[in-house]
Image (spheres, grey):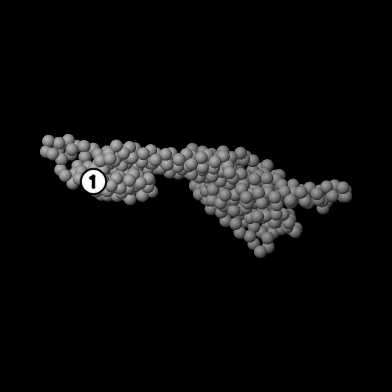
Amino acid sequence: MTLRARDRLAAVTRTRWFAVVTDLALAGAAVVDVVVLLPEWTPFEVALAAIAVLGLLVRRRLPWVAFALVLPGLVVDAMTIAAPIALYSVAVRERRLPPLVAAGAVTFACFLLPDWQLPELDYLAPSLLYALLYAATPIALGALVRTRRELSDRVADLSAAREAERRRDEQDVLRRERARLSREMHDVVSHQVSLIAVQAGALQVSSPDPAARTAAGVIRSLAVRTLDELRQMVGVLRAEGAPTGGDKPQPTLDDLPRLVADSGLPAELVTHVTDDLAPPLQRAVYRTIQEGLTNARKHAPGAAVRVSVRTSTTTIDVVVENDPPTGAALILPSGGAGLRGLRERTELLGGRLTAAGGPDGAFRLAVSLPRRTPES
């Protein structure tokens, strides 16, 4: 049993013992109320008093039963303490106003008319006041306690709802961060690792040194395994539909020539862009070209690649297209997360993506994004 469970059990046990002690104390007070008058009572009145005392012992579970058992003793003027205790218990459990008014009226009448006799005229006004206080005070106290309990429960519910909302917010933040990490891992790491695999494969084929070919084969095998593990990790991290947030990007359009030059492909870059594009837009352009080069390197080795980036007054258009491959495609792990993540990024920026391949292995990736400046 955990410490919290033990504390909760101890609190429940203390509450139950307190309730038992309280009920016994109230029953004892009712007994003291009548014991001094026992010699003057008839056996019938003694029986009513005993029934009233026993009724107080069930007031928590059966408040209306306890109230009904107490009333006969009040009518014959056998006891006066048990009745307000039972009426208080009713008021604590009963939320409906008509039953409470009826119980108060019955208590008022029974207190005002002991032995079914009206008080003398000189004592009528004080008797009415005493009877009203006798019936109304337990109801008011019971309603106050009930309201306090309901407010406490409501506060507890609000606290629980607030805690649940806080946990949901934390999960949303975590989900967005996981989506961002998965996208960065795929865009950056897979690009570099696939380039290592391509270069190692080329070295393995072209090197005359057997040791170099063996080392290149090991490097290529490790790169392929790394890509496979990276794909699995991206699948775990990716939170579908989570936004990327407003993080400031690191790559810009100035990095495009180096990206194309380091790709290891016969690629041509044509750009007609301005330098006032918003950083998220520049990052999206960079990631689009990076993904297009990665796909061309994996699926169309040896093919010529053409990369173009053009801006108009309203849009920026990126196209990466490759010719049919001149060699066998590399067998590298691929989970399809690249284009899917690129499409998510494009849609978040309000653009559209089209990707189409030909039967001969040619492929065209096009992204059109609404143009924005850093101030827009």
Residue under the point 11% across and 38% down: 121
Q: Does residue 364 appear to the left or right of 216 in the view shown? A: left
Q: Does residue 327 appear to the left or right of 254 in the view shown? A: right
In the image, 144 versus 194, the foreground residue is 144
Q: Which quadrant is home to the N terminus?
A: top right
Q: Quadrant of residue 298?
A: bottom right
The amino acid type of the residue labelled 1 equals Val
Give the residue pinned by disc 1: 75
Q: Quadrant of residue 271?
A: top right
Residue 204 is situated, as x and y percent measured from the top left of the image, at 82, 51
Residue 115 is situated, as x and y percent measured from the top left of the image, at 20, 45
Residue 150 is situated, as x and y percent measured from the top left of the image, at 37, 43
Any part of residue 228 in sight: yes
Residue under the point 23% across and 46% down: 75
Q: Does residue 137 appear to the left or right of 194 in the view shown? A: left
Image label count: 1
Residue under the point 62% across and 50% down: 236
In the image, 267 versus 113, the foreground residue is 113
Any part of residue 244 in sight: no
Residue under the point 82% across and 53% down: 205
| SS under mark 1 | helix
Residue 319 is situated, as x and y percent measured from the top left of the image, at 60, 52
Badge 1, how many Cα within 10 Å: few under 14, some, many 20+? many
Q: Is residue 318 above or below residue 375?
A: below
Q: Which residue sits furthest left?
A: 121
Q: Which residue sits furthest bottom?
A: 359
In the image, 336 versus 330, the foreground residue is 336
